[in-house]
């Protein structure tokens, strides 16, 4: 066990009992920066200092974790490239020397910062910058994040000293308490997610009008990689440039939020470059040479009897609500893509209808309604209904009026799965969730019944199911071919590709480093896998290919059934044990303290407290009982849909809208259910 674990556990248990969950981070002995060479896989305070220095130089824009992962290596390489050093992603003497020479003229941001404050920044002469809301700062904390906190508190009128110290002492604690009291927050003198989020709101409110200083021209030649969660001046420059080009209508906040990511995707699609929502050198170069996108004037030319969406500038997605969503649903109804109620809530049926329209219109299929989709809708004609379509009318059965598709949940889905299983078209679990396996089984049945094959269970499908005979031979729910939408292909760069590479590695088809880039080596691995399993061998990952890869890799990972641990189940002990693992790195397939993946972490913590869980997130989801959000309590498990349909990520709920989990880019950490990223991917709570 690491130093400080006992005190951490005591503090967590006490705070959970008080319903204000706060975690003590284990203390780590500080080593002098530069004493050892730092490289991928290392985790210590020197890595944290390295990240802070790289962040100060503009090469690292993520959370200061102390874990030397792919993002830190990328930042080191970027710095080495800028300084003309050997680019190997390893921080050795030359890199340390260049960092020290560069930062010697500015106050140090390392954890070894002086607490005297004599060399701190002037509050009045400094500009406030966005704070990382995924951290907890408390008395004894040091570094650049504390300095940013002091500046923000000073600008808000709560921090009295005229300069920063970079050390969280009595003055900082007192200022935090005063701020919390004034803003009706929990008064504990600890700057956690709630406090930091409120400070960011006030910083943004006072600085949004001063966007002109972030010239979009500053993007030229940038080697940074900006993505969801990034913050700072370069993000402001990116937002300003996207605004100039009519792709972004939000506020220039300096925070890379969902709206920014959507704007980047829209621009990348229009520019004909890889669409991943991540702004890197290629996107920056394209932005510099781009002309403003033409705004649509179709809204003034629509007929009086038709719903107009041309004037909508918002980005609508799953979870959105309001009049814009009603207009979208009405338009989709007119075009015969949507048969649900015009509720004003962007639900699964609305998302599926948008996808269907996008596919028919030949534009990017992502289920998100943005400017490009709205423009296409204004010029679209109603789609002709087919007599073979599952949405056509006919003699109905008990379920004949329902239309079930991927993403649907409930008893009707459970009944459909049971019928398909009895007819030997489906071999998955009766989960009540319409996932890729259910869709594949529906397609197989439709093909055998001579119906239109679309994987959607509508009136004609239900009617045919009632009179169908069991399929001869074994059931197959994996499907084959590449007729479903493309999920990943050559040129993509994101976390989904990294997950693909890890899965192919587990199945024995990929032996390289999981970089998150879909290059020639990854394409060959996919092609080899497809050949092995008699799929269309084109190197493109469709839903059919992805489902088979997940099926095969899960066999190699195994489904462990550990022996029952002794002792009873105690929620406080569960949370305390989970908190003791904060900082353990992420490792795909990991089930030990050397590294966890999401379900390996939850399985480990629950087992330690006397409860055995199955291995994967999907299995753990199915093993638990449903809990409504209103009845969610500490110790329950929260689930998310991330890289594939259905439950693919999970964590343990700890109260106050927060959960602890093993994130692929953070390791074991605390996150908030209320952030855009997790809110949009949340699919439910289970109790075990």
Image: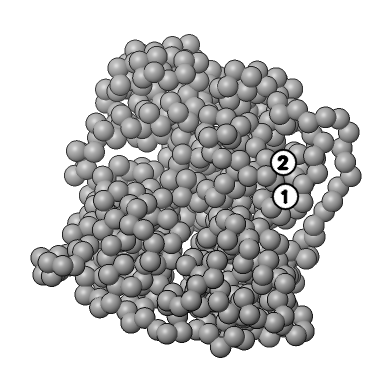
Residue 466's label in the rendered image is none
Coordinates of residue 583 in the picture (x, y in percent): 65, 38
Spot the residue most to the bottom: 450
> What color scheme is it?
one colour
Q: How many residues crowd around disc 1 within 10 Å: few (fewer than 14), some, or many (20 or more)? A: some
Q: Quadrant of residue 365?
A: bottom left
- Report how far apart the C-alphas of labels 1 and 2 lie in the structure: 7 Å
Coordinates of residue 288 in the picture (x, y in percent): 26, 63
Say whether residue 259 is visible. no
Q: Is residue 484 above or below residue 141?
A: below
Spot the residue most to the left: 300
Q: Is residue 642 above or below residue 269?
A: above
- Identity of the residue drawn at 59% across and 62% down: 413
- Identity of the residue drawn at 62% across and 76% down: 466
User: Is 291 on the left-hand or right-hand side of 502?
Assistant: left
Q: Quadrant of the N terminus?
A: top right
Coordinates of residue 222 in the picture (x, y in percent): 36, 56
Q: Earlier in the sequence, mark 1 or mark 2?
A: 1
Q: Quadrant of the C terminus?
A: top right
Say whether residue 25 is visible. yes
- Identity of the residue drawn at 74% across and 63% down: 554
User: Is 404 on the left-hand or right-hand side of 557?
Assistant: left
Q: Are marks 1 and 2 in contact (CB under 8 Å)?
A: yes
Circle 2 residue = 688
Query: 191 or 40: nearer the eye?
Result: 191
Residue 623's label in the rendered image is 1
Assign a secondary structure to mark 1.
Answer: helix
Query: 54 or 191: nearer the eye?
Result: 191
């Amino acid at each position: 066990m690491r130093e400080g674990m006992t005190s951490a556990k005591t503090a967590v248990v006490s705070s959970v009992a008080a319903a204000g969950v706060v975690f003590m981070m284990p203390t780590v002995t500080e080593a002098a920066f530069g004493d050892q060479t730092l490289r991928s896989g290392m985790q210590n305070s020197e890595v944290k200092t390295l990240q802070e220095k790289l962040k100060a130089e503009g090469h690292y824009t993520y959370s200061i974790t102390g874990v030397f992962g792919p993002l830190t290596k990328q930042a080191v390489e970027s710095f080495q490239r800028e300084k003309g050093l050997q680019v190997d992603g390893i921080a050795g003497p030359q890199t340390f020397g260049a960092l020290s020479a560069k930062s010697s003229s500015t106050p140090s941001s390392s954890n070894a910062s002086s607490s005297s404050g004599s060399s701190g920044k002037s509050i009045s002469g400094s500009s406030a910058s966005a704070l990382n809301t995924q951290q907890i700062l408390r008395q004894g904390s040091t570094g650049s994040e504390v300095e940013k906190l002091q500046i923000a508190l000073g600008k808000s009128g709560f921090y009295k000293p005229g300069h920063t110290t970079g050390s969280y002492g009595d003055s900082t604690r007192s200022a935090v308490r005063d701020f919390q009291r004034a803003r009706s927050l929990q008064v504990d003198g600890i700057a956690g997610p709630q406090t930091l989020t409120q400070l960011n709101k006030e910083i943004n409110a006072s600085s949004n009008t001063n966007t002109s200083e972030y010239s979009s021209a500053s993007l030229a030649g940038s080697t940074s990689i900006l993505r969801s969660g990034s913050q700072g001046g370069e993000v402001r420059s990116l937002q300003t440039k996207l605004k100039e080009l009519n792709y972004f209508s939000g506020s220039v906040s300096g925070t890379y939020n969902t709206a920014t990511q959507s704007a980047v995707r829209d621009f990348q699609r229009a520019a004909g470059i890889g669409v991943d929502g991540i702004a890197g050198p290629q996107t920056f170069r394209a932005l510099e040479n781009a002309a403003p996108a033409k705004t649509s004037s179709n809204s003034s030319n629509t007929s009086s009897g038709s719903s107009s969406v041309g004037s909508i500038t918002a980005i609508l997605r799953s979870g959105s609500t309001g009049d814009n969503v009603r207009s979208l649903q009405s338009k989709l109804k007119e075009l015969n893509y949507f048969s649900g109620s015009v509720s004003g809530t962007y639900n699964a049926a609305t998302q599926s209808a948008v996808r269907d329209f996008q596919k028919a219109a030949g534009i990017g299929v992502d289920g998100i309604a943005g400017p490009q989709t709205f423009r296409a809708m204004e010029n679209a004609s109603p789609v002709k209904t087919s007599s073979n379509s599952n949405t056509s009318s006919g003699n109905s059965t008990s379920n004949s009026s329902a239309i079930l598709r991927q993403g649907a949940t409930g008893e009707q889905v459970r009944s459909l799965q049971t019928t398909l299983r009895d007819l030997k078209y489906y071999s998955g679990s009766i989960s009540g969730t319409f996932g890729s396996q259910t869709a594949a089984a529906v397609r197989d049945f439709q093909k055998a019944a001579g119906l239109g094959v679309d994987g959607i269970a509508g009136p004609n499908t239900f009617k045919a199911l009632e009179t169908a005979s069991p399929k001869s031979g074994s059931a197959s729910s994996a499907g084959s071919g590449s007729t479903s939408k493309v999920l990943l292909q050559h040129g993509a760069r994101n976390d989904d590709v990294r997950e693909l590479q890890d899965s192919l590695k587990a199945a024995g088809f990929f032996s390289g480093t999981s970089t998150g880039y879909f290059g020639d080596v990854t394409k060959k691995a996919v092609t080899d896998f497809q050949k092995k399993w008699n799929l269309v061998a084109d190197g493109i990952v469709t839903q059919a290919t992805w489902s088979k890869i997940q099926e095969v890799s899960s066999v190699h990972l195994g489904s462990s059934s550990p022996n029952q641990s002794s002792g009873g189940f105690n929620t406080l002990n569960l949370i305390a044990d989970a908190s003791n693992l904060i900082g353990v790195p992420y490792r795909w397939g990991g089930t030990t303290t050397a590294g966890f993946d999401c379900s390996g972490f939850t399985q480990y913590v629950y087992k330690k407290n006397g409860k055995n869980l199955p291995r994967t997130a999907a299995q753990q989801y199915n093993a638990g009982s449903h809990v409504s959000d209103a009845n969610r309590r500490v110790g329950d498990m929260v689930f998310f849909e991330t890289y594939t349909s259905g439950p693919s990520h999970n964590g343990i709920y700890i109260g106050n809208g927060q959960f602890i989990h093993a994130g692929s880019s953070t390791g074991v950490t605390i996150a908030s259910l209320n952030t855009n990223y997790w809110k949009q991917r949340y699919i439910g709570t289970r109790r075990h």
